[in-house]
Amino acid sequence: MSDFRFTRRQFLEVTGATTLALSLDSLGFLGGMAHATEKIFQKWEYKNWESLHRDEWKWDRITYGTHLVDCYPGNCLWRVYAKDGVVWREEQAGKYPIVDPSSTDWNPRGCQKGCSFSNMMYNPDRVKYPMKRVGERGEGKWKRITWDEAADEVCNHLIDAIQTAGPESIIFEPGPGNGGWIHLMSSMNFLGSLGATELDINATIGDFNKGVYETFGKFQFCDSVDGWFFGKLLLIWHMNPVYTRIPCYHFIADARYNGAEVVTIAPDYSPSAIHADEWIPIEMGADAALGLAAGQVLISEGTYDKAFLKEQTDFPLLIRSDNHKFLRETDVEKTGREDQFYFWDSAANSPVKAPRETLSLPCDPALEGKYKATLKDGSQVEVRPGFDIFKEMLDRDYTPEKASQMCGANPETIRRLARKAWKARGHVQILVGWNSSKYYHGDLMERAMCLLLALTGSVGNK
Ligand code: SF4
């Protein structure tokens, strides 16, 4: 961004206006306008800064454009104003249709990186053609080569690798795919066809929410980002959307205006903490303790959504006390399914098969208690609903006082968080980005978050 000295000198020669150049420099105009625009700059003559300011508003073409600068969801819509074929300024376009009139508007979308994107496009450091290193690594010496020469170089190396060590010796690290899907898919297709070793995108960059995957069978489950507007309690937890979801952040602010409360749980007083109603500082990596303790408060105070737990979770499934495994049909019948589990029907005082492929409950399953089930050899074994075991573990290990020693949050803060979650039941939203997924045992953090959503019945609602 700073390598524009040559162009600026030329520019000064043309205009003879040092003060103008300083003004432009301080406005940041010159930084991005380099080689590609040299000729145009020579042609454009500005007498002084006022002249430049007035001419900034003259263009000969308006188009639309977007970018994907390592941003998600990205692809914001921009108006692009060009003069003599050079992008002169950019402006957010307010052209998104109203998708859901009960939410707030998407318009306009954009961020500061986007509104200065032409600086990047015209930056002299941008790689526009193949370059071959001719100096030592790190020396910065490069020579421009043709596309044919580049293709030959790459192919020769690929053939050498295949002949000497086999195609699997070629390692393809695709990165996060931010060059766009066409680039990603074409290189994946090519190298996959060769038999190269492809590294898993999510394994290399850690954008895989393991705990969410373990719980739901999908590594992401959510609605679109305007759904934030409908939350009553937004827990920003392992995320910093003020920084990283700039075009979408307003849905959080809109939700607050709509009466939602925003709590940021983070070790640092992050930009997202500044804009929250409450900031809960926490020891790094201790989030599971906080989540489990909040769950302990909800359960011990009897404030949890029993109907949701019975219908939507595996909490009512019976677990054998002798081997800590689910009670299965293969345990109780000579021929049976491994994946047929059981509830305890308190009314009939007997186990009953849990439904498969339907959510209709065959009975009102017990969530608590110890029962006796008869196995196929006639012996009896103690069984308990998973919830009963889980509750015992929380009461033993994750009271707010005990969790406080692990996560650093005050016990009363943990209780307050739980009570807020119950007050907002049905509409608690957890904004988890791709940070917990980069932790060893990040899955346990995410599962604790899933627990809070389940206890408050906050899945499946707007
Ligand atoms: S978030 Fe910023 S960089 Fe990304 S597409 Fe939108 S304006 Fe461009």
Image: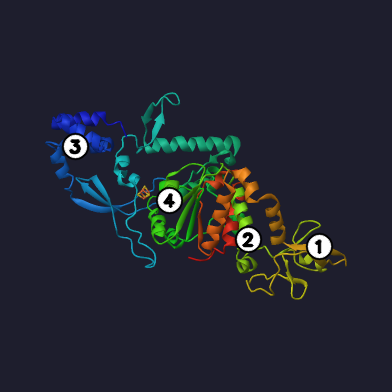
Q: Secondary structure at mark 2?
A: loop
Foreground residue among 128 and 158: 128
- Can residue 217 be seen from the camera position used here? no
* Residue for badge 1: 382
- Residue under pointer 4: 72
Looking at the image, tell me whether mark 4 or mark 2 is earlier in sequence order: 4
| Of the two numbered discs 3 and 2 in the rendering, the one whose residue sits closer to the viewer | 2
Q: Nearer the viewer, mark 4 or mark 3?
A: 4
Which numbered disc flags the more N-terminal residue, 2 or 1? 2
Mark 4 secondary-structure assignment = loop
What amino acid is at disc 3? Answer: Phe
Q: Which color scheme is applied?
A: rainbow
Residue 141 percent across, percent down from the top left:
39, 26
Task: Name the secondary structure under disc 1.
Answer: strand
Residue 41: which disc? Answer: 3
Query: Which quadrant would residue 197 be assigned to in this image?
Result: top right
- As measured in the structure, the alpha-carbon distance from the residue carrying label 1 to the one carrying label 4 is 50 Å
Q: Residue flagged by tag 4: what amino acid is it?
A: Tyr
What residue type is disc 2 on? Answer: Glu
